[in-house]
Amino acid sequence: MPRPHPDQRSDPARTGSLRHHSAGRLTAAPSPAPLVDRFGRVHTDLRVSLTDRCNLRCTYCMPAEGLGWLPRAEVLTDDEVVRLVRVAIQRLGITKVRLTGGEPLLRRGLPGLVARLSALDAAPELSLTTNGIGLARSAAALSEAGLNRVNLSLDTLRAERFAAITRRDRLTDVLDGLHAARAADLSPVKINAVPVRGVNDDEIADLAAFAVEHGYRMRFIESMPLDAQGAWDRDRMVTAEEILERLGERLDLVPVGRQDNAPAEEWRIAGTDAVVGVIASVTRPFCGSCDRVRLTADGQLRNCLFATEESDLRALLRGGADDAALEAAWRTSVGGKGPGHAINSPEFRRPERPMSAIGG
């Protein structure tokens, strides 16, 4: 276990989990008040984007030429990320932190940042969403630093198709990353795939079979209107119902349901312990049980993936705000969260940021 960073040891207010009494005994500190919105949803899951940069150019995400990346000076430093996560877990009751991007493996010194987060008092469950490129050489170090598990994006098992979808010939690197994650015990290793009609929807059962064979957990995600080009076409979206029909052609599925507030509905493959999940953000919205809040790489707090407004925590940080002010801003933002994303409503407005700049 990595040693706590000095900024955790020097300030008694930061210890969070234990408190000294005059008699010299150690007692548990009171739990923080939950982070609740006006609909009574308790938020315990924080998604932290570490960069908006990516080394793939997936056709359903961004144009071939890429995007204009954030200037380095606008991206949160490691110290700023650690402080915001500490406030989140010790003052707001966050218990899960997922590191995202862009591609988070492009963040310099990532194992060191993970080590600092895992050393926090009341440390959260730490996970990572990645495209897998570079994971083969970093999985062991990330596991040693305290990372618990990974989700890896993989939309096809065919090399030529992978190159067409991502505009990069890197399928072998991604598969190597999967194997390295399993070897490093970053379990359960989950695979995320976005089926697109006429592109890779004929591989749905193949991907599930691959995951079962290698001990991974497969999840299919309905495509969402979050691409930078604004080219999302609902007719090309493969629905949850269609995904299950394709799976049912080759597999006998037993319903499991949704675990806690997880976004995926799950099915067990009969005769095995393997589980496959479907995240139906568009056709079966789960907004009523949403427990997630997002922090962008430039320090903007988003109370919904599809939020059209953000709260600037970076400005507070760099302006000298104390933890109480950060907590208050966080609670105000989540308190104003709407009932749902309204994708299926005529009033729906796409967020200005694409998914790569928001963070999954």
Image (cartoon, grey):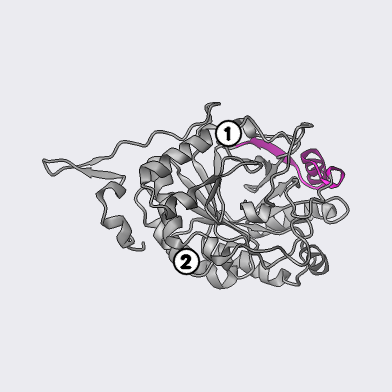
Residue 229 x/y as whole percent: 78, 55
Q: Position of residue 48 (x, y in %)?
A: 53, 52
The residue under label 1 is 337
Query: Disc 2 marks which residue?
Result: 111
Position above or below: 357 against 23 = below
Q: Would you say the residues marked 1 and 2 are in contact, meaning their CB atoms lie under 8 Å apart?
A: no
From the viewer's perspective, is 108 left or right of 350? left
For label 1, the SS is loop
User: Residue at 43% of width from left, 52% of height from top?
Assistant: 317
Asked whether residue 247 is drawn in magenta, I would say yes
Q: Position of residue 169 (x, y in %)?
A: 76, 72
Q: Tell me which numbered mark, 1 or 2, is placed earlier along the sequence.
A: 2
Left or right, residue 306 beside residue 33: right
How many numbered circles are shown? 2
Amino acid at the residue labelled 1: Lys
Compute the Cα span from label 1 to label 2: 33 Å
The correct choice, above or below, for 359 with respect to 162 in the image is above
Q: Residues within 10 Å of mark 2 (few under 14, many from 20)?
A: many
Q: Nearer the viewer, mark 1 or mark 2?
A: 1
Q: Which residues are magenta?
A: 234-258
Q: Nearer the viewer, residue 153 or 19?
A: 19
The N terminus is located in which quarter? Answer: bottom left
**Residue occupying the far left of the picture:** 23
Depth order, front residue of 73/95: 73
